Amino acid sequence: MSAILKLEDIRIRTTLIPGDIGYITYLHGRLYGKEYAYGIAFETYVATGLVEFYKSYDPERDRVWICEHNRKTVGFLSLMHREKSAQLRYFILEPGYRGIGLGKKLMDLFMEHFKKAGYESAFLWTTKELGTAAYLYMKYGFRLTEEKESDTFGKRLTEQRYELSL
């Protein structure tokens, strides 16, 4: 990858194609295992959630943003409907694609669809270890509303819920 990578070099598509669910699951398992020592339980959590997303997909209410560079998936974000609320899920960027504005671009796209689809609230779950992500969420108006201790992902951690209301 070139040191002069620019945001414009990234293609973002909004449709799932064969291989996406498996690859996004793999990407989460690999990166969170390496960067945060999450266990296989986290990867299965992601796989289950992505299958749920696909099975309940509503093109008017739901959305995916799949980031590609040179035909390789390098990032992902989804908006999943939950009754009257939107859930932000599976936000991930390959390490070499962080810091170029791609995370902000994905959040802008999330907020655009969130408003266009008529949602009045959104939420997400993350962990306390992901401080950079939490900072980005808060810049978009999300507020920390709940914390709970957990060992769901193969290690002791603090899960956090962030909410946004218009």
Image (spheres, rainbow, N blue to C red):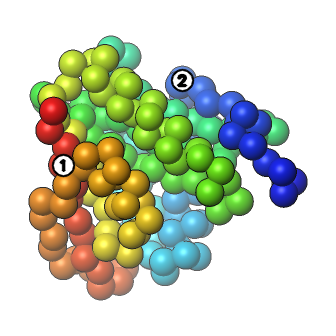
User: Mark 2 or 1, which is nearer the eye?
Assistant: 1
In the image, residue 101 above or below residue 1: above
**N-term mark: 2 or 1:** 2
Answer with left or right where residue 64 lies relative to residue 157.
right
- Label 2, on which residue? 15
**Circle count:** 2
Characterize the local packing of mark 2: few (<14), some (14-19) or many (20 or more) Cα atoms within 10 angstroms: few
Q: Secondary structure at mark 1?
A: strand
The picture places residue 116, in percent across and down from the top left corner, at 31, 17
Query: Mark 2 is on which residue type?
Result: Thr
Seen from this angle, which residue lies furthest bottom?
156
**Dot 1 amino acid type:** Glu
* Nearer to me, 61 or 151: 61
Who's the residue at 20% across and 25% down the image? 119
Residue at 32% x, 39% y is 52
Instruction: Give how far across and how far down residue 163 sits, in percent.
Output: 18, 49
Q: Is the C-beta separation of discs 2 and 1 under 8 Å?
A: no
Q: Which residue is mark 1?
A: 163
Tag 2's secondary structure? loop
Quadrant for the N terminus, please.
bottom right
Residue at screen point 84% across, 51% down: 4
Where 4 sits versus 56, above or below?
below
Residue 96, by quadrant, is bottom right
Residue furthest front in the image = 139
Q: Is residue 163 above or below residue 3?
A: above
Residue projecting furthest to the right: 2
- In this view, 93 is above or below 19: below
Residue 166 coordinates in the image, percent (x, y):
15, 33
In the image: residue 129, left or right of residue 158: right
Q: Is residue 62 visible?
A: no
